[in-house]
Amino acid sequence: MENTKVVKRTARARRTHAIARLSQKPRLLVFRSNRTVYAQVIDDQNGKILCSSSGLKTKATGVKAASEVGKKIAELAKTKKVTEVSFDRSGYKYHGQIKAVADAAREGGLKF
């Protein structure tokens, strides 16, 4: 197996997905592509996506777009009566855009 960035990240992601699924709370999954950031609140007990948000329709890029995604996902989760989630960063390091999503979601009212 190669030791590329993608392989290492997916191995970390498998571990974090498993840990997040063990908790009884819905999980806030964050995915970062080259273009933008995506966030979803997933209920693993029922296997359903409760709400999702992305930075595709925002004019901002980078950390600003990520914080907008965090605010939007917090609003959508509140409408679904979700206040407490486990944060699944999908193997990404907790800085930059991932941290911006988490901080904005916390400001929006979600508890990790």
Image: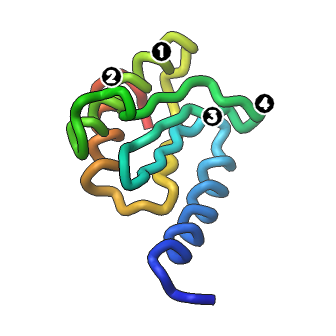
Viewer-proximal residue among 23 and 43? 43
User: Mark number for residue 4?
Assistant: none
- Under mark 3, the amino acid is Ile
Question: Where residue 84 appears, x then y in whole percent?
Answer: 50, 29
Residue placed under numbered mark 1 in the picture: 78
Dot 2 or dot 1, earlier in sequence: 1
- Under mark 4, the amino acid is Asn
Dot 3 or dot 2, earlier in sequence: 3
Does the CB distance between marks 2 and 1 fall below 8 Å? yes
Question: How many other residues sit within 10 Å of disc 2, few (<14), some (14-19) or many (≥20)?
Answer: some
Does the CB distance between marks 2 and 4 fall below 8 Å? no
- Under mark 1, the amino acid is Lys
Residue placed under numbered mark 3 in the picture: 42
Q: Which residue is drawn at 61% across and 64% down?
A: 15
Distance between the Cα atoms at labels 4 and 3?
9 Å
Q: Is mark 4 on a helix, strand or loop?
A: loop
Distance between the Cα atoms at labels 1 and 3?
14 Å
Residue placed under numbered mark 4 in the picture: 46
Question: How many other residues sit within 10 Å of disc 4, few (<14), some (14-19) or many (≥20)?
Answer: few
Q: Is mark 2 on a helix, strand or loop?
A: loop
Dot 1 or dot 3, earlier in sequence: 3
Residue placed under numbered mark 2 in the picture: 108
